Amino acid sequence: MKHDQQDMKLKIIARIHNDFPTKFGIPHQSGRIDALKATIVFEPEYRNSEAVRGLEEFTHIWIIWQFSQAVREDWSPTVRPPRLGGNVRKGVFATRSPFRPNALGLSSVKLEDIEFHPDLGPVLHVSGADLMDETPIYDIKPYLPYVDSHPEAAGGFTDSIKEHRLKVEFPQKWLSCIPGELKEALMEVLANDPRPGYQKDPERVYGLAFGNKDVHFKVKDDILTVCDVTDFVKDDSGEK
């Protein structure tokens, strides 16, 4: 028997802060690039150290968050995953597309440290997140390896996707523009090919916003060549 229920209103408990001011270049899934560091800062109402008591015992956590740049009223039962070239349709519930009835994301990240800040309360330092800067977070749960890890699981259509890395050529005159603590993470992001799967034009110049820099590059024959680095300017809409 169906019971009438009121829609549950989700509360934003925290926001993530990292070096991705725009969506372009964010890893396809969490946990792919350990060098990517981020902090999770709780909203004022939830800055209570008691709320994270015992969390330091876990090495990884689950984050439930909102695809804040993909919220829409309508929805489609099928989507075109970029990893399949953007030409093949799959059921939305068979993908991790942001374009869902409820624009919710789920990520598993490594918990590096818990800092108790005098003004911000408990701040979580994490690595491997696949979220955009200032993404709203609705919940945090500990990762439990004895039930959450399934090495024998089938990966569906993703099992047939060939993973590849690009060779990155980053001239020193441009690399010197990148702060030292961000170089390793940026090189990993570039090597993992930040382009959508359907964009393969060797003459196209892409712009990747990372930290406060905009990294321009081309890709030809699996070689990514950085051709310019400029200061990143964010407008009121949150895009370049």
Image: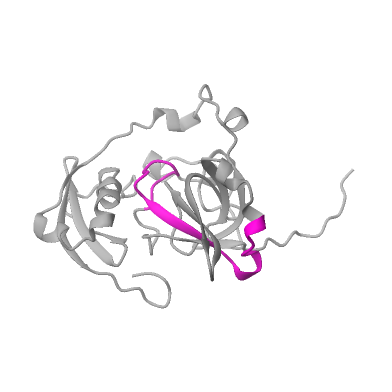
Above or below, comparing residue 227 to residue 236 in the picture: above
Left or right relative to 99: residue 176:
left
Where residue 161 sits in the image (x, y, percent)?
38, 32
**Residue 87 on the magenta segment:** no
Where residue 228 sits in the image (x, y, percent)?
15, 62
Left or right relative to 232: residue 51:
right
Residue farthest toward the bottom in the current orientation of the protein: 236
Where residue 151 sits in the image (x, y, percent)?
51, 24
The picture quadrant where one finds residue 22 is bottom left
Question: Taking the image as drawn, is residue 101 in sight?
Answer: no
Q: Residue at x 72, y 62 (%)?
A: 9
Q: Residue at x 15, y 60 (%)?
A: 176
Above or below, comparing residue 115 to residue 231 in the picture: above
Closer to the camera, 136 or 68? 136
Q: Which residues are magenta?
A: 26-50
Residue farthest toward the right in the current orientation of the protein: 1
Q: Quadrant of the C terminus?
A: bottom left
Where residue 137 sits in the image (x, y, percent)?
57, 58
Closer to the camera, 201 or 30? 30
Left or right relative to 151: residue 127:
left
Q: Quadrant of the N terminus?
A: top right
Number of marks in the image?
A: 0
The picture quadrant where one finds residue 203 is bottom left
Colouring style: one colour
Q: Residue at x 61, y 70 (%)?
A: 44
**Residue 29 on the magenta segment:** yes
Question: Taking the image as drawn, is residue 44 in sight?
Answer: yes
Left or right relative to 47: residue 36:
left
